[in-house]
Image (cartoon, rainbow, N blue to C red):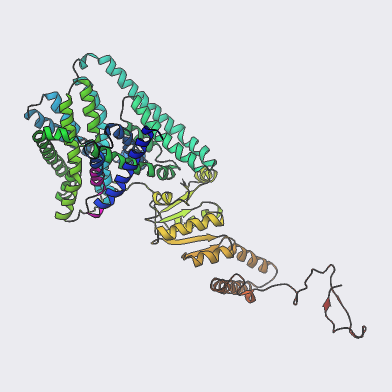
């Protein structure tokens, strides 16, 4: 094996091993996974074992984890929901960015920096880490709460802010104001990129996924999901915009698609791994040599920026109606810098606004602030009372994962009828189906059915199975239904499990596996059919109903015996029509009655085969 290949394999193993070892330890200590990744990255980076002499290359690849995170956030934000959050995004978010940016710029000028450098350094620190904040919200289970939704709104505005900030860097560059025509062309290209992505998302993505879903090739759907995310990011980058915003916009465009939950399930594993690698790369990027040489300046930068930004965040939170506890919680989450600062500082250095030393110092300050965030959040958790979860907040809606009280898997003939009484009673019903034609037909009748493979645990999780009060499996195919039932019973034991059984043997297996209720798919229709036949044959209605109740009772009794024994138990409860004793071979002609007196020596009269 070539030496280069061996070194790359060592690096891959080191990345995976560092995360696998460090994260469980730090989570066990209550410090969170983010800090574990940071520490692991520092250990294997240039200032640890030196396995990664160029952490910037790892960071560049790992940024795709942030891109996929923004895509998944976009999937939760339908255009209507995004519009309903406009006051939070452009009010609360813009207010926090403006106030904190002005305060931090003032701190930089007071520290002796030029106005341009102070502005870039301060605005870079304003952009909090989407990855860190979202990871901590997920670990706390707060993404769905009003507090979490306000945090998401602020993060979205900060991600949007990177676009005008990069334009401002170009303007602040020496000679930058002489390229007004070029700037206008850049704006035009950016707008064209956004328009192209919107058109593609509206008219191309859903037809493409319908075609791919019909192939039933899971790996192709996964590849298509990655193609959409990375393609949208590439288009935005070519237009001079943020790749993360491209992925977010693609997610928003697909948020009302019937395929959105399958897409989320396909992307989630990649997002999780790459986001972990991103945190590892941030830990590797901490330049201890620069910190050692400029430790006083770095310490002052971290303390000054964090304290001043915290004051700004708290003030905006209180002015906009947050409680004292909520304002402190938001301050602890957002007081750090973020990954977009690296992009902004690099652009400023390339444009000549910052020099390399200033870039290194401010980058180190951002990384240290990100590493301190889990500690501040932990201190907050220990010292402050629990945060009130005011779910009556009218400005915030819960994210639209499938979170209905009833999850129905399968929307064929059986599932359609099952949904009717539930919907008529007002239950919130979420429906999964993997047949594209069925989904399209259902939409014509006013049903919103989502595409998803119920045999996959990740799909069930993103479809809200963990929050559902009842899960109804109405899918076709015995093996398919059994796999889903086993998965649900083991992973979501709090949900009541109702299952459509294929036949008696399947029903017995389901009962033995502990489902709450099963029903053979044809049994009730067959009984009603038989009852109608009795009535048409002249049997009085009361007698027909009694007969059918007796059949039901015997069937239930026989099924209980079969569950305890085997498939042949309880056969005496069946009403059969075979002759007794039954012949070993089928008679070729009808039997005839013989008179034993006419035929001496013959057995007594009876039915005999000819």
Q: In this view, does 201 lie above or below 73?
A: above
Residue 67: x and y, percent?
Answer: 33, 36
Residue 170 relative to residue 5: left or right: left
Residue 136 relative to residue 459: left or right: left
Q: How many discs appear? A: 0
Towards the viewer: 610 or 22: 22
Which quarter of the figure has residue 589?
bottom right
Q: In which quarter of the image is the C terminus?
A: bottom right
The stretch in magenta equals 27-39
Which quarter of the figure has residue 65?
top left
Say if residue 99 shows up in the picture. no
Residue at horizontal 20 percent and vertical 47 percent from the top: 374
Residue at horizontal 53 percent and vertical 63 percent from the top: 519
Q: In which quarter of the image is the N terminus?
A: top left
Residue 226: in magenta span = no
Towards the viewer: 2 or 328: 2
**Prevalent SS, magenta region:** helix
Towards the viewer: 360 or 226: 360
């Amino acid at each position: 094996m070539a030496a280069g290949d061996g070194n790359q394999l060592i690096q891959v193993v080191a990345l995976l091993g560092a995360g696998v070892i460090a994260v469980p330890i730090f989570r066990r200590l209550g410090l969170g996974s983010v800090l574990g990744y940071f520490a692991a990255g520092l250990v294997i980076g240039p200032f640890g074992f030196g396995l990664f002499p160029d952490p910037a290359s790892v960071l560049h690849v790992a940024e795709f984890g942030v891109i996929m995170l923004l895509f998944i956030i976009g999937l939760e934000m339908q255009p209507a929901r995004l519009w309903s959050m406009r006051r939070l995004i452009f009010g609360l978010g813009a207010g926090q960015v403006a106030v904190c940016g002005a305060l931090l710029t003032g701190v930089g000028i007071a520290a002796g920096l030029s106005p341009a450098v102070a502005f870039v350094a301060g605005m870079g620190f304003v952009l909090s880490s989407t990855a860190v904040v979202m990871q901590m919200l997920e670990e706390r289970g707060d993404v769905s709460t009003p507090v979490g939704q306000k945090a998401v709104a602020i993060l979205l505005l900060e991600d949007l802010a990177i676009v005008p900030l990069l334009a401002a860097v170009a303007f602040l560059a020496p000679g930058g104001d002489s390229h007004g025509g070029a700037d206008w062309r850049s704006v035009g290209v950016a707008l064209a990129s956004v328009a192209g992505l919107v058109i593609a998302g509206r008219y191309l993505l859903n037809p493409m996924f319908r075609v791919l879903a019909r192939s039933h090739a899971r790996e192709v759907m996964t590849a298509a999901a990655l193609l959409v995310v990375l393609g949208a990011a590439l288009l935005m980058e070519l237009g001079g915009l943020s790749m993360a915003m491209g992925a977010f916009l693609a997610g928003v465009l697909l948020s009302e698609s019937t395929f959105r939950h399958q897409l989320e399930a396909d992307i989630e594993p990649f997002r999780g791994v790459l986001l972990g690698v991103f945190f590892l790369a941030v830990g590797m990027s901490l330049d201890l040599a620069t910190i050692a040489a400029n430790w006083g300046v770095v310490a002052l930068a971290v303390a000054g920026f964090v304290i001043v930004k915290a004051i700004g965040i708290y003030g905006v939170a209180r002015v906009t109606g947050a409680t004292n506890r909520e304002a402190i919680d938001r301050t602890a989450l957002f007081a750090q810098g973020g990954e977009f600062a690296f992009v902004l500082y690099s652009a400023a250095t390339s444009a000549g606004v910052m020099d390399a030393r200033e870039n290194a110092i401010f980058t180190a300050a951002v990384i240290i602030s990100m590493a301190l965030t889990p500690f501040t959040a932990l201190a907050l958790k220990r010292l402050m009372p629990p945060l009130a979860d005011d779910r009556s907040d009218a400005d915030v809606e819960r994210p639209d994962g499938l979170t209905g009280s009833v999850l129905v898997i399968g929307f064929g003939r059986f599932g359609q009828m099952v949904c009717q009484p539930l919907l008529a009673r007002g239950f919130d019903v979420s429906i999964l189906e993997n047949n594209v034609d069925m989904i399209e037909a259902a939409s014509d009748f006013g049903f919103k059915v989502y595409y998803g493979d119920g045999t996959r645990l990740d799909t069930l999780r993103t479809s809200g199975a963990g929050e559902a009060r009842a899960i109804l499996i109405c899918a076709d195919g015995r093996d398919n239904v059994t796999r889903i039932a086993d998965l649900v019973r083991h992973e979501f034991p709090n949900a009541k499990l109702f299952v459509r059984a294929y036949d008696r043997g399947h029903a017995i297996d389901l009962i033995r596996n502990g489902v709450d209720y099963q029903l053979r798919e044809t049994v009730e229709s067959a009984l009603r059919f038989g009852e109608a036949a009795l009535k048409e044959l002249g049997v009085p209605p009361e007698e027909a109903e009694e007969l059918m109740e007796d059949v039901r009772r015997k069937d239930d009794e026989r099924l209980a015996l079969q569950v305890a024994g085997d498939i042949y138990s309880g056969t005496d409860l069946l009403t059969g029509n075979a002759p007794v004793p039954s012949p070993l071979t089928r008679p070729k002609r009808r039997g005839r009655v013989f008179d034993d007196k006419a035929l001496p020596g013959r057995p007594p009269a009876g039915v005999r085969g000819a």
